[in-house]
Amino acid sequence: MTLTQRIDDPRPLLELSGIRAAYGRIEVLHGIDLRIPEGAVVALLGPNGAGKTTTINVCSGLMKPTRGIITIAGRPVNGATPDRLARAGVCTIPEGRGVFPNLTVRENLEMMTFTGKPFDRIEAEAFDQFPRLADRRAQYAGTLSGGEQQMLALARGLATDPALLLLDELSMGLAPLVVEEIYDIVGRIAATGVSLLVVEQFARTVLDVADLAAVMVHGRVVQVGTPDEVADELSERYLGGKRKTQLTMTAEPET
């Protein structure tokens, strides 16, 4: 299975149709419909507990839906394992950063040679995209700043040459200025043609780079639209007033 798709193909790269998912007897996704067009950045927004991370887990193969169909480039992939999806071009950067803290930056990158890509190419591409990592190549990942760890996680993900990136809460634990820097990088990644599904609490920041956005509430997608359309919806639904410069949402713990 590969994620190849013609430029003029009307099918979305990733599509969720009627997806339901549950933890034991508790259903948390209640019929999700979501389309990720090829080469698009789609922001998945909503309060904690809305089911955003569960949606990411379903897309990455970490969680099997109880009902519904997942298709990638028009092919059903229900039941596909995370490693099979990864080989097909789906890369997930999980909440909390995906690095090995007891390995150096260089060793973290070296582990990505399992893809078959030569290490010198992986390293060159990583340091070109993230120059700060080049200065810290011999430093243990666990001693990097939060922003640098997130850059390393992105560099590791990009080493797989993904067609689809699933990003879960890149901003967690980061200062607002660092979040802006990280999303500048996300914008550059999107410009290369990689499709992205982004779960984020800093709604305003991700909307600045998104082509489309979907709002989730209580396990359902309640609106899909342009960033401007969705920003107005978010402002009224979660902030109780007019649109504000920085949209953030907090509530009960995420599912």
Image: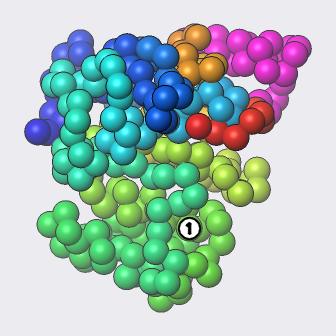
Q: Is residue 244 magenta?
A: yes
Of 166 and 205, nearer the camera is 166
Residue for point 76% across, 56% down? 175
Would residue 224 be found to the left or right of residue 239 on screen?
Answer: left
Graded by Cα atoms within 10 Å as few (under 14), some (14 to 19) or many (20 or more), the crowding at tag 1 reads: many
Q: The residue tagged with tag 1: helix, strand or loop?
A: helix
Q: Which amino acid type corresponds to the residue marked 1 in the rendered image?
A: Gln
Tell me where residue 221 sits by quadrant: top right
Would residue 172 be found to the left or right of residue 123 on screen?
Answer: right
Tell me where residue 122 sits by quadrant: bottom left
Write the start and end of the magenta stretch as one range.
225-247
Q: Position of residue 217 (x, y in %)?
A: 63, 19
Q: Position of residue 64 (x, y in %)?
A: 33, 35
Of 44 and 207, nearer the camera is 44
Residue sticking out furthest to the front: 25
Residue for point 38% across, 63% down? 156
Q: Which residue is mark 1?
A: 149
Q: Position of residue 76 (x, y in %)?
A: 18, 25
Position of the C terminus, as image quadrant, is: top right
Would residue 223 be found to the left or right of residue 91 on screen?
Answer: right
Q: Position of residue 233 (x, y in %)?
A: 71, 12
